[in-house]
Image (cartoon, helix red, strand yellow):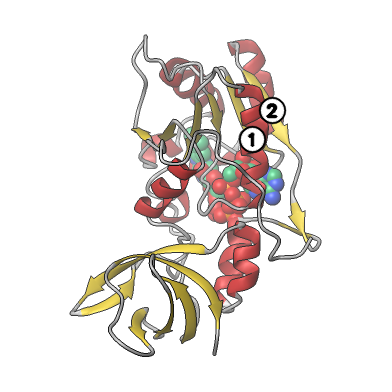
Amino acid sequence: MAWTQPIQHEPRQPAGHGRLRHVADRLPASDPDRGAVLLLGNFDGFHRGHHALLDAAERIAGEDLPLGVMSCEPHPRSFFRRADCPFRLTTPTTKAHRFAALGFDYVFSPIFDAAFASLTPAEFAHGVLKQGLGVSHAVIGDDFRFGRSRAGDADLLARLGRSLGFGVTRVPEISANARRCSSSQVRAFLRAGDIRAANGLLGTPWLVEAVASGGQLALSPTLCRPPAGLYLCWTGSAARQLHLSADGVVTADQGASPAAGLLRFLDRLA
Ligand SMILES: Cc1cc2nc3c(=O)[nH]c(=O)nc-3n(C[C@H](O)[C@H](O)[C@H](O)COP(=O)(O)O)c2cc1C
Ligand SMILES: Nc1ncnc2c1ncn2[C@@H]1O[C@H](COP(=O)(O)OP(=O)(O)OP(=O)(O)O)[C@@H](O)[C@H]1O
């Protein structure tokens, strides 16, 4: 598959509906979003592998069941301090933007803290998925791990689902050019300045938040950072050539700098 092949994915709801509910903890007993089909994982960026889970979930949900996606905050990688440089593909704002555009009804965004990380697989399945959210179905990749010390795997979730009364669908690995699609791979392409390859995995140009910082415009500080250089970016109204410095400052090649807000990285020019 070519990196640049676009994703043929129609959002489930008409464009513009796009309202996304944020669920931090649990859904009340008679809430209409109980009974949802829920995608489990972190979903930083929403790449081709994640799209395969969404496709499966949409087939299960049909027209009737709500669709949810889990995405912890902070990202578990921050909690475990596994990253030594900014790594995120999405800020909470761009993540919500993307989930809404994809047609999710809610994002389940628990605070990933010591208490949450220490839940056993059974506690997570019973207390969070069954009692807290009342899911009818969970959709995961084959390599999904969950619970304290990553003790739970896809087989265990399927067994827990059978005993608790919810379905579990496992999606086989999606790869591109013989490599597993992953958020880590998208980060590696971005850090190498290969915007096209990153966008090919994402299926859409990388959407970033640019913020005002010390009188300048800069990439949001938690975001993964491409190398200093000249980039072609979509500012919402036009494609512009923008310089990115090593510390994330964005300046226009010509004319005024774009306003703070959302930018899409289209290509690296130099
Ligand atoms: C309830 C729950 C508890 C978890 N506890 C841990 C944990 O103790 N240690 C861990 O490494 N991952 C844990 N995870 C998995 C993380 O959410 C995360 O997916 C995983 O650490 C992936 O990290 P990576 O992006 O660095 O590969 C847990 C997940 C869930 C849903
Ligand atoms: N290439 C893939 N094929 C099938 N399932 C996938 C793929 N990538 C991720 N998944 C599944 O999508 C869900 C979300 O995964 P996760 O957020 O850990 O993404 P990731 O790309 O593996 O991230 P990271 O590289 O940061 O570990 C999990 O259930 C995971 O198993």
Where residue 242 sits, quadrant-wise, is bottom left
The answer as to whether callout 1 falls within 8 Å of ligand 2 is yes
Q: Quadrant of residue 161?
A: top right
The N terminus: image quadrant: bottom right
Residue 106 can be seen in this image: yes
Q: How many marks?
A: 2
Q: Amino acid at mark 2?
A: Thr
Disc sitting over residue 169 in the figure:
2
Q: Is residue 225 left or right of residue 205?
A: left
The reply to whether dot 1 and dot 2 touch (C-beta < 8 Å) is yes
Location of residue 172 with respect to 164 vertically, above or below: below
Residue 121 on image: x %, y %: 55, 28
Q: Circle 1 is placed at which residue position? A: 140
Quick one: label 1, few (<14), some, or many (20+) residues within 10 Å?
A: many
**C-alpha separation, residue under disc 1 versus residue under disc 2:** 6 Å
In the foreground, 208 or 259: 259
